Image (cartoon, rainbow, N blue to C red):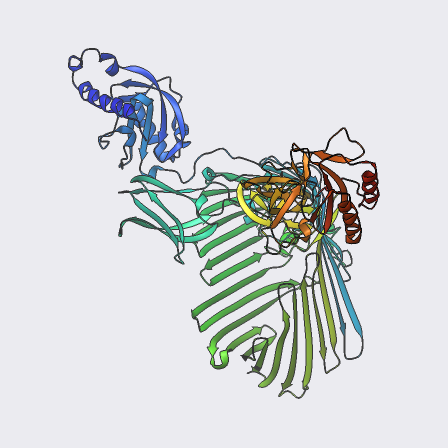
Amino acid sequence: MINIYSRKISMFYSVLTIFSSLSNASVPKGFEELVMARKEKLELNVYSNEHYSVFGEFIVEGDTFKLANSSSIDPSLLINLGLNKEGALLAYKKLLKGSSTSKQCKGFREECIITPQDIDFVYIDDKKKLTLFVSPEFMSPLLNSEKSFITPEIDEKALIINNSISYSGVSNEDNSYQDNYSYYNESYLGLGNDSYLRTDFNLGTSNGLSFDDLSYNHISGQNKYKIGYQSSNQYWNATDTLESFNNFSSYIFSTGSTNDLRVLKEEDYERFYFSSPRSGRLEVKNDQGRILISKNINNGPQYISYYDLPKGTYNVTIKVFDGDNVIFEENKLIINKNNFSAKIGELDYKISLGYLSDEFVNTSLDNNNEYEDYQAPFFSDGRLMTRVFDTLSIGGGVLATSIDYYAYVGMDYQITDQASLLFNGGIFNDKDTFLLTQLRWHGFSLSWRKFTESDDNSDVNLSDLLFYNDDYENININYSYNINNDNSFYLSAVYSDFSIEDSAFITSTTTTTSFKLGYTRYNLPLNSQLNVDLGMSESDDSDPQYDVGLTINIPLGASHTYSHNSYYNMSSKEASHRDNINSYWLNDADNTFSTNAGLYYSSDKSSPTSVDISASYATNGDQIKSSSYLYANSDGTMSGNIFLESNAILTKNDGFLTTKKSDSYFVAKNRTGRINTDGKFSSVIQEYVNDEAGRTILLDNELEVHALKSYKKYSFNVDQYSSDFFNDGESNVEATSFPGTLIRLDTSVGELKSFISTFVDIKGELIDSVECVGRGCVQTERLVEGVYQFKVKKSLPYKIISRKEQCVIPSLDNSDSRNLGENFCMPSFEDSYSDYQLAKFSDNDYYYFIGKFTDDSIVETYKKKFMKSGVVFVERKVDGFSYIFIKSDRLLVKNELNDVNEMMSFALENNLEPYVSN
């Protein structure tokens, strides 16, 4: 709220402004200095971006102001306030010429909200502040804020290995057996705060050893460096859109820009500016009608930050309501991909130097020697990509050797939320060309690739390594459409044209064309489903083939499905049929088991009737994921396949397995083991990713392993205050999820126990002062006189005391209720009687503590003996134990002490005093 004094100043200054438009003689005496020209340092900001401002020197005369010659303000500084280039230049010209407060501003200037035609100003003299009101078309969708990058802070280096193994075997009709195995390994070894090693290879019986990647990687701020061997590329930056050529194998050094470590804050996200004619309620909805933003706004210039919107590309409807009336409405395509795209006007770049070699690719195969035959294996590759505006990115690059080069360009155009156009093209120095176009429009997609070789040169060229060594053209068309909930169809067409040159340099061309049309009808009687497929295919060496297929699926309960398939080839006039029953016997989150039994028969006598059966089993455990498949046919053919996948995390002192694949992990290890949380509130670990709340992890298992997103600033905090458990281990950890690293949190979680007890002294009188001491104590609360509530850590030492003397309570493990009933506290013992635990009360009563007993017969024997001596036998029972005292109005004599000593010899022995509770 603006204070009264400030308002009076502002109003008074407005009155003086009226006088300043008259001659100086009209100015009231004593106020001349307020309207005289003077140099002032003013704060300049845009109304909708009040957190950003610049300072400059102005010549102020009454209510007019203009930039002083000495001012440091220029159009580039105004761009930092959120104006686009045109807006910054217009505002700069107005300030140079001189302006005054807009006449639309009525009343208190600090509360003015105006809707300008282009740019207007409001000058607030007492605050030395100049506010710009800018029409939306002069605002930039992005603030020119500085990029902020994570400084990697590694918690623990690790070797992370993503493993998978595949094995398959086939037994044919002639009892011959063939098998094949493959092992895949992707590993990361953290080397420090900004570097890691990466390997990605596969080893199999067919192709031998192949390395996709073997490299050292270093990331610092917005720059990335890589050196090693690669046969396929990883995502780097927006320039990857330009890569239309095949992956090539090489030893390589690369550097370029990257957003991997960039921290995205609200000001880094794009903004959509608009102007509301009145105050009202802003609602932003997507095509599905989901409300994405709902808030109250003022009239005048406003913006929507993409920070508040979901990631992706989609359409939204923006409305401002005044009651039930829509006072502003606009449809807007949202492209919110800040994690992957550069800002508008920024450049992404990548530069690579390397040596072409397929030395570590398919070592068991006879390669075609193109790499060995190419005469200039050293190469360089440089590329740039820039985002022209929010829907269009363009770029280009050159890959060159000492004898060849390939110059290429590319464009990525996001037409709507469901439509995009991608184009790549390039030309070699020998006039070979490549073109690629991909169009996506709702359910329709079209891709066209064409490589044209300009001559029949038999030498190996750069184009042979990047695009094969012969001409080809390929067109793919796909379209799918859901007519309604019961009907859908799809269309698919493929055209391929390949030119192949044989060893005699004779070129032959092969052209193939295929076309498929499918229709599906759902929700037929018996909840059945019908599929109809029409197909056509032809090639240079065969006549056109036309076929039709029909499949009907009928559920047989919740776990079984019957299906019939008929296939008819119109060219050969042959038909084949298959009846099939598929059954799921087990289907949950961790295990799936199904079987399939089928009968095949055909009108073609060369295809005999056969019966087959198959079984599939898949598991998804915490450490290993597996899937297996077995098949047997009545013709004698059998086959099987098994696939195993697991990820190992190895550190200097520990090793873990998990099925969750990543290059960095979070591990929470609880020293107290698994916690029984039945009916209790668990402690949790709250995750924060780049300071934003993420997952909530329950702390009830001995070990929790969670995959992390790469290059994020993580924080994990244990929340135990609203739970029935406590943590005496580490409570928080902060680190960066860098490849080859582990973020570890070692906890020690135990159960909190809460109980209520009434305490009396040995005489049965209420005690008004009780406390809990020790590491296990959490809270002590006095409810009423003599009644207390305690919260303790059950597994840690604690004791209940009254005036330094301990109280006796039952074991919490043996108690069925939180109310422990009445219990007692030990009296204060006299130090002068070291041989006995003797308490003397103010009424001259003496209490001798004999000890703690479990044998009732011993207690009864001595109880009778002491009662004959004229002393009082006091017994307190707690938790199955008898605590025995002897009460007397005098000190015991020798023969009585002999009985005391004798009974004390039967008392339970403990390392601690017999009345210690925990």
Q: Quadrant of residue 778?
A: top right
Q: Residue at x 33, y 24 (%)?
A: 129
Task: Name the image quarter holding the N terminus.
Answer: top left
Query: In the image, residue 50 lies at what x, y percent?
Result: 38, 32
Taking 524 as reference, is 596 left or right? right
Q: Nearer the viewer, residue 160 or 538?
A: 160
Query: In the image, residue 437 lies at what x, y percent?
Result: 50, 56
Q: Quadrant of residue 486?
A: bottom left
Q: Quadrant of residue 595?
A: bottom right
Q: Nearer the viewer, residue 297 or 413?
A: 297
Task: Name the image quarter holding the C terminus.
Answer: top right
Query: Is residue 258 something one can see in this rendering?
Result: no
Query: Where 37 falls versus 631 (above or below)?
Result: above
Taking 881 as reference, is 5 left or right? left
Query: Where 789 falls versus 91 (above or below)?
Result: below
Query: Where 225 falls versus 638 (above or below)?
Result: above
Q: Nearer the viewer, residue 130 or 882?
A: 882
Q: Residue at x 49, y 61 (%)?
A: 446
Taking 837 as reference, is 327 left or right? left
Query: Is residue 773 something one can see in this rendering?
Result: yes
Query: In the image, residue 665 lies at what x, y percent?
Result: 66, 47
Query: In the image, residue 724 lies at what x, y percent?
Result: 60, 48
